[in-house]
Amino acid sequence: MPPSPEELRADQQVTLASRRRRYGIPARILFAVMDLMYGHERSLEKFKVLEIVARVPYQSWEVVSYIAITHMYPDKAFAKEMFDRVKLARDAQDNEQFHLLILEDLLQQRGRGTGWFKRRLLPQLLAVPYYHTTWLMTALRPRWAFALNADFEDHAEHEYMRFVADHPEFDSQPVHSMFFDEYGHFGSLGDLLRNIGMDERHHKEDSIEWMSRKTSGGLLNRVSVMRALRLRG
């Protein structure tokens, strides 16, 4: 069951009262590019683009983690940690996918279908280099990838909550989507967007938690060591 409207409003106030993370250079570059392409104004269209990009880190985490398991499965503790990361990445991808599908559904209901170039091609052009960047970070130094994702999700959380705060009329607008049976039902557009903002907070918290985990180096270093030991054996 989704949180109650009262809980969602309380969570929104927590976000609005909190300071944003101190974003790193890669995150600031990404946000600047998005603002350049889509403007500084918050809108459902811009949030849809954000959700296309939001899935990318989790896709790269899943791929890198499976590579790690393939090469490092004799290290049972490490393999289990990688499989835990795979499960986290899958759940987060599904959640972000629901955000994207719901926002697209709402835009179509409002007769605001997206254009091919700006709303479909450009997000993919953003997503491709972002994927390779997060893949490399995850392989070399996972903490970098988790920190970047925490920055991205923190930005998304604050943007959603500020968007609702700037549009109090959203609380009187009913909302429906064909995806609500799987995602959850909400009485207003405001509560839906607050809940999406809370999802982003949870993703941020997961990323911060993974940042704190001790590792003995990135995947590429570990695989090289394991191969050397096998050859020596």
Image (spheres, rainbow, N blue to C red):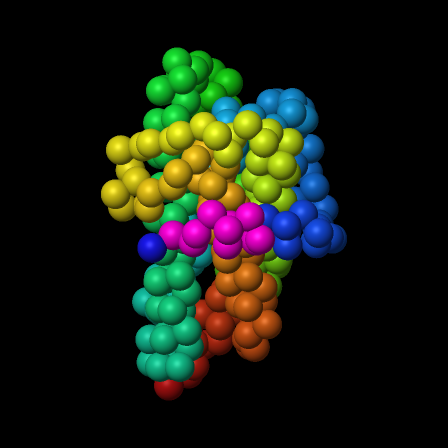
Relative side of 215 to 93, left or right: right
Q: Quadrant of residue 79?
A: bottom left
Magenta-colored span: 2-11
Residue 66 percent location from the top left of the image: 35, 62
Residue 164 percent location from the top left of the image: 58, 36
Give the residue displayed 49% in from the left and 72% down from the top.
222
Q: Nearer the viewer, residue 87 or 108?
A: 108
Quarter of the image with the N terminus in it: bottom left
Residue 213 percent location from the top left of the image: 55, 74
Q: Nearer the viewer, residue 141 or 221?
A: 141
Q: What is the magenta segment's predominant secondary structure?
A: helix
Give the residue displayed 50% in from the left and 27% down from the top.
44
Give the residue displayed 70% in from the left and 41% down from the top.
28
Where 71 sits versus 128, above or below?
below
Q: Nearer the viewer, residue 97 or 214?
A: 97
Relative side of 209 to 173, left or right: right
Q: Is residue 95 visible?
A: yes
Reply yes or no: does residue 4 show up in magenta.
yes
Where 123 sits versus 86, above or below?
above
Relative side of 97 to 149, left or right: left
Q: Quadrant of residue 46?
A: top right
